[in-house]
Image: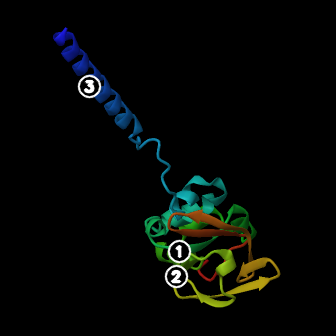
Amino acid sequence: MKKNRFVGRWATFFLIAISISATVLSCKEDSKDLVKPKTITDVILENEQFSILRDLMIHAGMSDALRTENLTVFAPDNNAFGKANISASLITQLPKDSAKLFLQNHILKNKTKLSDLKVGEQLTLNRVKVNIARVDSIVSINKADVVIPNVNADNGVIHVIDSVVVRKFL
């Protein structure tokens, strides 16, 4: 009788230990299940409306910079490039330095939501002055209207604009 009680207690102990282990192991997060934050580079790479901007970013060697720094990007979509008669093939024919300067004309340091943008002159990443204007609810940068504001990224924010900003390098 004592032997049965002893075996019963050990069996109960092992069942509890196995249950606790199974519970703990099943709660462990699988890295495949985690949603990874998207950087500005990731958003541009994954969105077809930015295919020309993507080519510009890659050609200019700016992919890493748009992954790490905390920035505000005024991103012309493909229609904006089309309005300026700028194609992907034209972008990739630019000297790398010119492509980089052109892209930097669309970037401000620091993450700034549209509602927090200061009206007036701002310096872009390459220290070119651009004019931020606000008329009613429309915000523009050098007369390029923001059509989709506040696309959040892990390292900044993207404001989609309807035309390119400074064209002096083309």
Residue beneath the point at 19% across and 17% down: 6
Residue type at the position of mark 1: Leu
- Earlier residue among tags 1 and 2: 1
Identify residue for label 3. 13
Q: Is residue 84 left or right of residue 44?
A: right
Camera-side residue of 99 and 65: 65
Answer whether labels 1 and 2 touch (C-beta < 8 Å). Answer: yes
Which residue is disc 2 drawn over? 125
CA distance separating discs 3 and 2: 65 Å
Quarter where residue 65 is shown: bottom left
* SS category of the residue bearing label 1: strand
Q: Is any part of residue 129 visible from this angle?
A: no
Residue 93: image location, x then y, percent: 54, 67
On the image, numbered disc 1 is attached to which residue? 71
Estimate the x, y position of residue 56 in percent, counting from the top left: 55, 66
CA distance for labels 1 and 2:
9 Å
Task: For the residues labelled 1 and 3, say whether their Cβ atoms are less than 8 Å apart.
Answer: no
Q: Please name whichever residue, 133 or 16, is drawn nearer the observer in this view of the structure.
A: 16
Frontmost residue, 91 versus 119 = 119
Identity, as a three-letter code, of the amino acid under mark 2: Leu
Answer left or right for 24 relative to 117.
Answer: left
